[in-house]
Amino acid sequence: MNPIKKLFSVKSFIPSDGGRGELPSSRAAYGNLARIALPSVCEMVLISLIGSIDTMMVGSIGTEAIAAVGLVSQPRMLMLCMFFALNIGVTAIVARRKGQGDRADANRTLRTSLEIIFLLSVLITAIGLTFSRPLMRLAGAKADTIDGANTYFRIITMVIPFNALSMAMCAAQRGIGNTKITMYVNVVSNVVNVILNYLLINGVCVDGNWIIPRLEVKGAAIATAVGMVVGFVLAAYSIFGRHKKEGFLHLRIRDDWRPSIPSAKAVLKVGGNSMLEQIALRIGFFLYARLVADLGTQAYASHIVCMQFLNLSFTFADGIGVASTSLVGQMLGKERPDLSHIYGKIAQRMAMVVALVLASAIAILRYPLVSLFTDDQTVMRLSANVMLIVALFQPLQMQSVITSGALRGAGDTKYVARVMLLCVAVIRPLSAFLAIRLISNYFTPVYAMADIASGAVSMKYWLAYEAPAWALLGAWSASLLDMFLRMVLVMRRFNGGEWHSIKV
C-alpha cells in the first residue's frame, strides 16, 4: 500500500484488540467525521475571527484598551470553568444516550443540567460583581488599565446566566452531532456583537450631534453582553421550539422538571473530573497571564495580539475535537470501541494536515497579520517574534486538543484532568516564572557589564524594551513545553486503549 494512503487508511487505525464488526470505508468514515466537524470548525473559526475583529476595534482606542479588555479574559474564564466542566459531562452523556437510542434519558439529562447550571450561574454572578475590582488587580491590572478592565468585567458578568445556559444547550446539541444549530447560534450572536461594537465603541456622530454616544471599552462590553443574550434566545429556540418536537432533543415547559438524581450523578461523574481539569486550566492560565502582565503594557498587548492567532488556530482543533467527542461517545454507546478508536485516529490525521497549513501561514505572514491589530512599532516587533512560537504550537496543539476530546467523549475525564493539572497548573506557570527570572537576573547584569561604557541610557533602554521582549519569548517557550508534554501524555493514553471499557 502507498505509504501516504496507509497513513490515512481506516484499516491502519484498527486497535490492537481487533475489530468488532463491519468497518466503514475510508471515504465513508472521513465523511462521517467531516459532516459533524465542518459546521463546528466553521462555527469556532468564525467566532474566533469575530473575536479578533472585536480586539481590532478595541485596539483603535489605544494599547491600554487592548490590555484592559485582555485582562478580563482569565478571571472570566475562571468563573466559567465549572460550566465548561459540566458541559463536557452533558456532551459525553447525551452522545452516549444517542448511541443507545435513549431519547427520554437524553432529554432528562439536559433538563437536570439546565437546572443545576442556572442555580450555579446566579451564585457566580453575585460573587463576580461583589469582587470585580480585586479580581482585576489580581489579574495584573495597573493604574492605566484598572478602570477599563473593571467596567468591562462587571458588564459581561451580569449576563453569565444567559451565557451558561446557552453553552449547556449547545453542548447537548453537539453530543448528538447537531453542530449546524450551534454554528447558527454562536455565529449570529457574535455578528450582533460586532455590529454593536462598531456603533458603541466609537459612537455615531451626525452633523456634530452624537446619535449614539462614544462609549469605548464600556461600549465593547455592552455589545458582548447583548450578543450573549441573543445567543441564549437562539439556543433556547433550538431546544424548546415547537418545530423541534420530533428531534432527538426537545424540551417543553410542561415537562417533568423535577431533578433526576441518576442523570445528575451521570453528568457530575464525567463533569466532576472535568471540573478538576477546568480549574487546573484556569488557575494555570491565570498565573501565566499574571506573569506576562507584569512585563508591562506593551509586552502584554503583544501577548494579547498573539493570543488572537493562537485562539484562532485552536478553533480548528476544537471544531474537529467536537466531532471526535461526539462520534467516540456514540460508537461506545453502540458497543463499538473499535469504531470509537478509528474515529479518534481519523480526527488526528485531519488535524495534522490542518496544523501544517496553519503553521506555514502564520510563520510566513506574521508581520502583515500583527499589523491588523496595532500600529505601535514596539508591539508589532514583539508580536512578530512571538508568532514564530505560535507557528510551532500548531501540530502540538492540534493533536493534544483532538485526542483530549476523544478521551472526554469516552468518559475518560479523570486522566485528562490529571494531565491538565500537571502540565497547565504546574509546569506552564513554573517554567514561565523560571524563564522570566533567568532573563531578569542573568541577562540584565550581563547586558549592563557589556555596555557599562555607554552609560545609563543603554541600560534604561534594555530594561524598558529588550528585557520584556526576551522575557515574553521565554514565557511563550514555557507554554510550548507545556503543550508538548500534554500531547505526548494524551496520545499515549489514547493509543493504550484503556478507555474502551469505561461506563457512564
Image: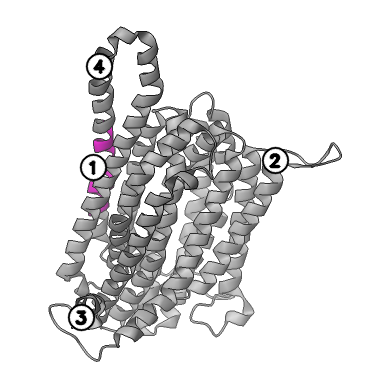
Amino acid type for the residue under numbered disc 4: Pro
Q: From this viewpoint, is residue 176 visible?
A: no
Amino acid type for the residue under numbered disc 1: Ile
Q: CA distance from mark 3 to mark 4?
A: 57 Å
Mark 4 surroundings within 10 Å by alpha-carbon count, few (fewer than 14), some (14 through 19), many (20 or more) = few
Mark found first going from the N terminus, 3 or 4: 3
Looking at the image, is 46 positioned above or below residue 391?
A: below
Of residues 226 and 98, the one drawn nearer to the viewer in this rendering: 226
Q: In the rendered image, which residue does mark 2 sit on?
A: 202
State the image coordinates of residue 315 (x, y, percent, origin top left).
Answer: 43, 59
Q: CA distance from mark 2 to mark 4?
A: 45 Å
Amino acid type for the residue under numbered disc 3: Asn
State the image coordinates of residue 116 (x, y, percent, origin top left).
Answer: 46, 60
Q: Quadrant of residue 465?
A: top left
For residue 2, the mark is 3
Q: Label 1's element? A: helix
Q: Label 3's element? A: loop
Q: Label 4's element? A: helix
Mark 2 surroundings within 10 Å by alpha-carbon count, few (fewer than 14), some (14 through 19), many (20 or more) = many
In this rendering, position of residue 44 left or right of residue 483:
right
Q: CA distance from mark 3 to mark 1?
A: 41 Å
Q: CA distance from mark 2 to mark 1?
A: 41 Å
Please identify, in this view, whether the residue under mark 4 or under mark 1 is nearer the observer: 4
Mark 3 surroundings within 10 Å by alpha-carbon count, few (fewer than 14), some (14 through 19), many (20 or more) = few
The part of the chain drawn in magenta is 419-433
Q: In the rendered image, which residue does mark 1 sit on?
A: 427
Please identify, in this view, whether the residue under mark 2 or under mark 1 is nearer the observer: 2
Mark found first going from the N terminus, 2 or 1: 2
For residue 445, the mark is 4
